[in-house]
Amino acid sequence: SQTIHQWPATLVQPVGSPLSLECTVEGTSNPNLYWYRQAAGRGLQLLFYSVGIGQISSEVPQNLSASRPQDRQFILSSKKLLLSDSGFYLCAGSRANLNTEAFFGQGTRLTVV
Amino acid sequence: LAKTTQPISMDSYEGQEVNITCSHNNIATNDYITWYQQFPSQGPRFIIQGYKTKVTNEVASLFIPADRKSSTLSLPRVSLSDTAVYYCLVDDGRNFNKFYFGSGTKLNVKP
């Protein structure tokens, strides 16, 4: 079965500091990968998705960027964090075929102070 | 991309059957309907997927009428541990399987 490893579970960062969240995938090759953000009590907002190495599509203009240096590695970054970047960040994957479901990591709770 | 509409919240009691309905009036011919469950501070988890009529697995049943403009997730005999947010998604997967989650339905199971 497919598994997403995501770390850290919680993170507190000062405003203006950089960010790097990493997730890795097990159990499938050439997956589609996603980064989501969830504000408290809200739904999931799709931030980035990737269909392959080096291929990144952004859904929402923001202070964040994503990279996919390897097939099973997806990284979310920021050069300078804002207070509004606080939230619950989730990495997800799916098999690269039609009508498949998404599988999620455990998430990272980011608090920018 | 078909838009989905779900109730914001629902209350139930342990042992009851819970039915959560999702409206998707603009569903396209190739669209599938998928439901996810999310516990606090965890990522969503796939529950069930269907295209038409009825689908059942060990966790839930999914009922889809002939016009496919709505779907109902049925949870038999809920327990306190079923308290979660439930999301309905509609997509044909052609758009690189971009999964758009709405606000979902917050199910609160009471003792």
Image (cartoon, coloured by chain):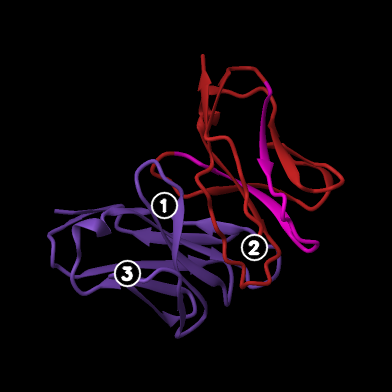
Chain colours: A purple, B red
In the image, what residue occupies the spot 71% across and 64% down? Answer: B92
Q: Amino acid at mark 1?
A: Gln
Residue where numbered disc 2 is placed: B1
**Pointers 1 and 2 within a single chain:** no
Question: Disc 1 and disc 2: Cα gap in Å?
Answer: 27 Å
- Give the total of numbered labels: 3
Q: Nearest the camera: A5 or B56?
A: B56
Secondary structure of residue under mark 1 = loop
In the image, what residue occupies the spot 41% across and 73% down? Answer: A74
**Pointers 3 and 1 within a single chain:** yes
Q: Is residue A22 above or below residue A90?
A: below
Secondary structure of residue under mark 3 = loop
Question: Disc 3 and disc 2: Cα gap in Å?
Answer: 23 Å
First in sequence: mark 3 vs mark 1: 3
Q: Is residue A65 above or below residue A6?
A: below
Image coordinates for residue A45, horizontal then vertical, percent: 44, 57
Q: Are marks 3 and 2 in contact (CB under 8 Å)?
A: no
Question: Disc 3 and disc 1: Cα gap in Å?
Answer: 23 Å
In the image, what residue occupies the spot 29% across and 57% down? Answer: A8
Q: Is residue B22 above or below residue A29?
A: above
Q: Is residue B32 above or below residue A43?
A: below
Residue where numbered disc 3 is placed: A62
**Pointers 3 and 2 within a single chain:** no
Disc 1: host chain:
A
Q: Amino acid at mark 3?
A: Gln
Q: Amino acid at mark 2?
A: Leu
**Within 10 angstroms of label 2, few (less than 14), some, or many (20 or more) residues?**
few
First to last magenta residue range:
B17-39
Residue where numbered disc 1 is placed: A106
Image coordinates for residue A28, horizontal then vertical, percent: 59, 70
Secondary structure of residue under mark 2 = loop
Determine whether, in the image, residue A93 is placed left or right of residue A89: right
